Amino acid sequence: MAPSVLLIGAGGAFGQPLTEEFIRKRSKFDRIAILAATEEKTSKFKYAQEDGVEIVIGSFLDPNVYKGFSHVISTVGNSIMRLQPGMIEAAIIGGVQHFYPSEWNSDISQKAIYGLRYFRDKQVTRDHLVAKAKGVPGFRYTIFITGIFTEWSVLEFYGFDHKKHTVKVYGKPDARVGLTSIPDIARYTVDSLLIPFEATGRDGAERVIRVGGEITTFQRVVDLLGEARDVKYSVTYVDPSEAITKEEEARLNGDEEAQMAWSIVPLISSGFGVPDGIPGSKLDNDRFSFIPEKVHETFQRVYKH
């Protein structure tokens, strides 16, 4: 039977491209639906409704909204990431058999970044999935590891100033970084629902999929962006310990948002912003039928003009 999929967080920065990819492959699914908290919030999804996507109104903590769906994909952002265990509980009660937590990032199993504040709620969600899978026969989940979104790797957040053509980054120029474009991540995700489930560990219920567009160095990313925009970026490399100090200051001041931000800012040039950071791990690109964009192709498409 074709999957029936409920999307949570479809209005977000990744949720919308993911929805658009589902629309392109609508015929391969039994149902595709978006969860909206209120009637007022459904207007932003009018484009999807016109292409056959259902809108379900209700709370993601209510088991009733999950009834009739085999798969749930959560793309929620940091503000409600910690509520995903509650979503999982409600989804299981509602009859969901397969859950995709909000991941699509670097391999957060790496010891060097496992404890970052930015990833804490993702780690809690993973542990909850493991626990539920042990007690609920037939329940499965998929963890997507993609590296950093290519389009987001050169945002001001990571120290880029596109007016002055400068970069201030906490790390080193030769640090490995894995990047995958947003359209490709959406395509990998949708296509993954259509390939046979192959467990990769955790009692036969966990599937980890590692994909990537390109693994290169941070300085090469800067150079490729400069080529796409026909400018030269000047880079200042700062000791990552300064970011750690700022993170601690934010924690002591009770500024959780800043604490999370400073914990993740150095990732881009740390060497750990990759999908293949665990010894023995390899990418699963060959399980899919398309070739992802390289970094220079994404920059040419997005930033050239």
Image: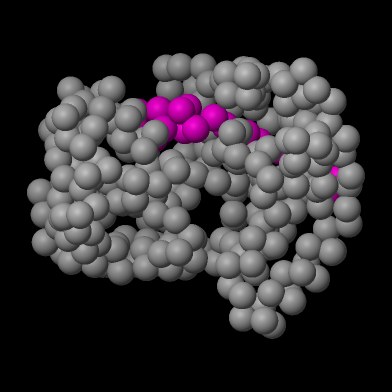
Report x, y in % for residue 211.
Answer: 53, 33
Left or right of 294 in this view: 197: left
Give the total of numbered labels: 0
Left or right of 22 in this view: 236: right
Image quarter of the N terminus:
top left
Which residue occupies 47% across, 39% down? 209
Please tell me whether residue 208 is drawn above or below residue 18 in the rendered image.
below
| Magenta range | 171-192
| Residue closer to the observer: 280 or 64 | 64
Please tell me whether residue 201 is drawn above or below residue 135 in the rendered image.
above
| Residue closer to the observer: 208 or 105 | 105
Please tell me whether residue 300 is drawn above or below residue 274 in the rendered image.
above
Please tell me whether residue 289 is drawn above or below residue 283 in the rendered image.
above
Which residue occupies 28% across, 22% down? 24
Residue 223 image-quadrant placement? top right
Report x, y in % for residue 203.
Answer: 38, 56
Taking the image as drawn, is residue 80 in sight? yes
Report x, y in % for residue 7.
Answer: 27, 46
Report x, y in % for residue 92.
Answer: 21, 61
Taking the image as drawn, is residue 196 in sight? no
Q: Does the magenta segment cover residue 91?
A: no
Q: Does the magenta segment cover residue 189?
A: yes
Which residue occupies 65% across, 69% down? 259
Image quarter of the C terminus:
top right
